[in-house]
Image: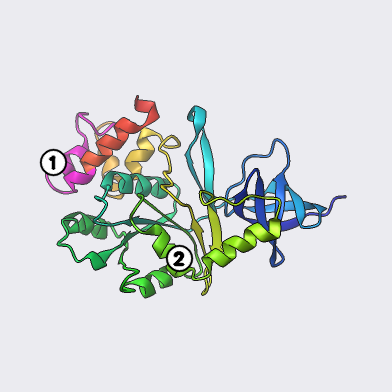
Amino acid sequence: MTELFEGLVISHLGKGLAVETANKTILCQTRRQLEKAAVGDRVLWSQTGIDQGRVEKILPRSSLLARPDRNKKTRPVAANIDKVFVVFAEEPYCDFLLIDQYLAICENKTIDAELIFNKIDLGKKTNLENELMVYQSLNYPIYRTSTITNTGLGELRQALDQHISILTGQSGVGKSSLTNTLIPDKQIKTNTISDTTKHGRHTTTAATLYHLPDGGALIDSPGVAVFGLAELSEQQLAFGFREFQPLIQQCQFHNCRHLQDKGCAVRDAAETGKIAQSRYLRFLKLREKMPTTN
């Protein structure tokens, strides 16, 4: 019987996987007909050569984030995530629609979502505070950070401690600067992955899991890791807006779409100011983006 070992997928290398096991990293191919593995997956693998192996099984996941792929399919991005940190800044212009999309997906996948207001060293008079107050009222933690002045980094490190987390958000908001600050030897670790596996090719677009100095891990996914809405139904999208949840049961019809439906408690709450109208309007925009409504 082939001996199986447990390992952790820490990156994709070309068509292979960098799998961390017993304090070393090996290059693994994946058994045919096995589903695509994600960074953060725990796997069982068999040895096929010196520092080489084959992934035989993906162990059960506690969570999975996926992104849109070709042919309306999805591709796994990260598995077994505890927290998603959505990074934004005043520059580039803050995309609250994207933030709400991330939050709705996390809400449905029971992954904790927290917000990072980065680049606060710019010292601009922000127009974001009213919206941020809405998120705070919904119990979404907000960290105000700057890698230039080291503001807020201690609190952020505490939030990351002992968790598997991922940073996501628009391009240009400072995710790379935050990651490089939180993981001082990131480049050394990246080179080690490539050197020890040799046969694989590590690219800057590959998501990679790094162990944090004080415990826990951070998955760095360069670019905009857009977690698609394709996996959500219309009802799940509404549930993803935390303030809608107690209102949904109050709607007159159980299949209420929260548009112009008669007796919609969600729309009424937005119109009367019981919930933020700005969030309700973004819900309508996200609903239009969903594949099922096109």
Q: Nearer the viewer, residue 251 or 84?
A: 84
Query: Which amino acid type is marked by label 1?
Result: Glu
Marking on residue 271: 1
Q: Quadrant of the C terminus?
A: top left
Marking on residue 111: none
- How many tags in the picture? 2
| SS at badge 2 | helix
63 left or right of 7? left
Magenta stretch, residue numbers: 257-279
Write the residue at 62% across / 41% down: 36
Q: Is residue 282 above or below residue 137?
A: above
| SS at badge 1 | helix
Q: Which residue is mark 2?
A: 180
Q: Is residue 231 above or below residue 206?
A: above
* For marks 2 and 1 on the same chain, the one whose residue lies earlier in the sequence: 2
Question: What percent of the width, then of the height, locates residue 155?
Answer: 36, 73
Write the residue at 26% across / 44% down: 247
Q: Quadrant of residue 30?
A: top right
Question: What percent of the width, then of the height, locates residue 17?
Answer: 65, 50
Can residue 78 be seen by looking at this rendering? Answer: yes
Estimate how packed mark 1 is, as few (under 14), some (14 to 19) or many (20 or more) residues with alpha carbons within 10 Å: few
Query: Which amino acid type is marked by label 2?
Result: Asn
Question: What percent of the width, then of the height, locates residue 181?
Answer: 43, 69
Write the residue at 43% across / 34% down: 230
Question: What percent of the width, then of the height, locates residue 286?
Answer: 30, 37
Q: Is residue 108 above or below residue 191?
A: above
Closer to the observer: label 2 or label 1?
2
Q: Residue at the left extreme?
A: 272
Q: Is residue 266 a member of the stretch shown in magenta? A: yes
